[in-house]
Image (spheres, rainbow, N blue to C red):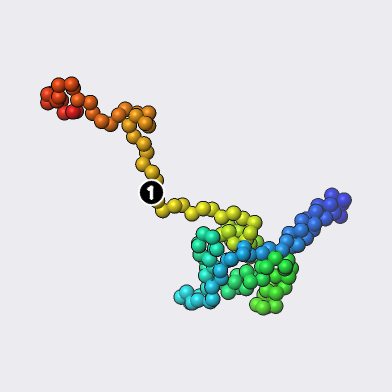
Amino acid sequence: MSAVDRTSNDRSAAGGSAARAYRPAMRPGVLIGPPVLRGPRTVHLVKHPVSGAAFEVGPKERFVMGLLDGTRDADDVVAAYAERFRLRLPEAQWTRLLGLLGARGCSPGRRTRRRPSRRPPAPAPSGRAAGGRSRTRTRPPGGCTGCCRRC
């Protein structure tokens, strides 16, 4: 193994340990509902504390979310998952779950998108205030003679 290979392996190991040392936590106030049957599946409803947006997760995701209290790192969560479900939590699923929670604003590091208001947009100003011609028709000083249909 060359010195370059060792250096790149050292960097990837250091990057991996830094990612593994991360201790994710759920945003305070996130509500996770009890198990509900949705057809043949069991799901939990998760509700954002500020926006009120809701989404569903399965029992395994719910278990992992319950462990995200900021005191456990990824290795602790993976070990608890393996003990409970007798399966190893794959890195791709771990990353996907953290991405989902971040995108939904359930982890404190992400800001949530504001929900669009339900009010219709204000009408565009018309007339001279908008820089255009006035919409009111001008009449000749003596009144309309009926020569045109504009007035």
Depicted 151 relative to depicted 90: above or below: above
* The C terminus lies in quadrant: top left
Residue 87 figure quarter = bottom right
Q: Quadrant of residue 141?
A: top left
Q: Secondary structure at mark 1?
A: loop
17 sits to left or right of 53: right
Residue at the location (51% across, 64% down)?
54
Q: Residue at x 59, y 66 (%)?
A: 29
> In this figure, what is the number of numbered marks?
1
Q: Specify few, some or many for label 1: CA neighbours under 10 Å numbering under 14, 14-19, or 20 or more.
A: few
Given residues 66 and 4, the one toward you in this image is: 66
The residue at which mark 1 appears reads as 120
Q: Residue at x 14, y 25 (%)?
A: 144
| Left or right placement of residue 102 versus residue 14 in this view | left
Is 21 above or below relative to 143? below
Residue 90 appears in the figure = no
Residue 27 visible in image: yes
Nearer-the-camera pick, 145 or 71? 145
* Residue 4, horizontal then vertical, whole percent: 84, 49
Residue type at mark 1: give it: Pro
Q: Nearer the viewer, residue 29 or 82?
A: 29
Kindly identify the residue that appears in the image at 72 percent across and 68 percent down: 72
In this rendering, position of residue 75 left or right of residue 120 = right
Where is residue 65? Give x, y as percent.
Answer: 62, 69
Q: Position of residue 67 (x, y in %)?
A: 67, 71
- 64 left or right, relative to 147: right
Q: Quadrant of the N terminus?
A: bottom right
- Residue that extends furthest to the top in the rendered view of this protein: 141
